Image (cartoon, helix red, strand yellow):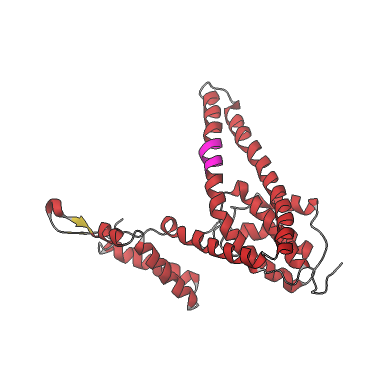
Amino acid sequence: MTTSNGTNSSSITKQDLRKVFFRSLTMEYSWNYERQQHMGFCYSMLPIIRRVYDNKEDQIQAAKRHMEFFNTTPYISTLILGISSAMEEANANDDRFDASSINSIKAALMSPLAGIGDSLFWGTLRVIATGLGVSLSMQGNILGPLLFLLVFNIPAYIVRWLCLKWGYGFGTSFLSKIEESGMMPKLTMGAAILGLMVIGAMVPNLVSVSVAGSLGTGDSAQSIQSIIDGIMPSLLPLLVTFGVFQLVQHKVKIAWILVILMAVGIIGSFFGIFAV
């Protein structure tokens, strides 16, 4: 069945969610420095996109939406996949739905979930699994590596599936309620602001620039970098980010931007401008 706007009104099935689940296992296979997990996310969303959109152009637009920057702990990335699936379904069946809110919600959720996921899986579960596996291995027991894999992966796979299921269920019911209350425009605006704040907060972690040299002599010497940090912490990474943004705005290709950054870094390090 097709709606008046050329989209498919069919509901997402459990089989579609299973396809998303198995595709999510490839989330980091195409990880890259430009947009990180974006290709894995888009690949995972394709069964949903094909289900809810009949029109080829709508499918292309939806796929492009999910090729934007994305990065979070892969084991709970399915929560965002589930919510995005519900939102794509709502967008396909409602002409008034704001499609830009899909990426806004993704951007708002990926960083907080990454903090939770990294602490849970990398900081806790992996340590426990490693301890159990190593204790057996040190005794010469061949089951040590197997125990590590089981202790880490069984909870990880269960959480991955439950997050997808809960994300889709939560997204469907939540979207219905906010549509009825008329709060969608406010939610979209709030999610967009929060998403931009999250992306902005990632700059100091993803961009590192340090200036070498110091002013003064002896005990009174003060590094130039500390003076800059005193004016504004992470000022140089922010300026580099704005510079790259301006290059992108002027349609400079990403490959050339990378070449420019490498050249500036190498020349600056060679002449002692940047600290290594």
Residue at image point 70% right, 61% down: 178
- State how many labels appear: 0
Q: Quadrant of the N terminus?
A: bottom right
Taking depth in this image into account, of 162 and 139 the one nearest to the observer is 162
Where 140 sits versus 213, above or below? above
71 relative to 53 in the view: left or right: left
Residue in view at x 16 percent, y 55 percent: 221
Q: Main secondary structure of the magenta part?
A: helix
Farthest right residue in view: 1
- Answer with left or right where residue 222 lies relative to residue 140: left
In x, y percent, where is residue 197? 49, 61
Residue at image location 36% in from the left, 59% down from the top: 234
Q: Nearer the viewer, residue 220 or 41?
A: 220
Q: Position of residue 181 (x, y in %)?
A: 71, 63
Q: Nearer the viewer, residue 133 or 59?
A: 59
In the image as oriented, which residue stretches furthest toward the front?
181
Residue 159: name its quadrant: top right
Q: Can residue 194 be seen in this snapshot? A: yes
Q: Position of residue 251 (x, y in %)?
A: 50, 77
Q: Residue furthest left?
A: 218
In the rendered structure, which segment of residues is drawn in magenta?
Answer: 119-126
The residue located at (57%, 65%) in the rendering is 192
Residue 114 drawn at (x, y percent) = 54, 49
The image quadrant where one finds the C terminus is: bottom left
Which residue occupies the foreground of this view, 204 or 255?
Answer: 204
Q: Is residue 140 magenta?
A: no
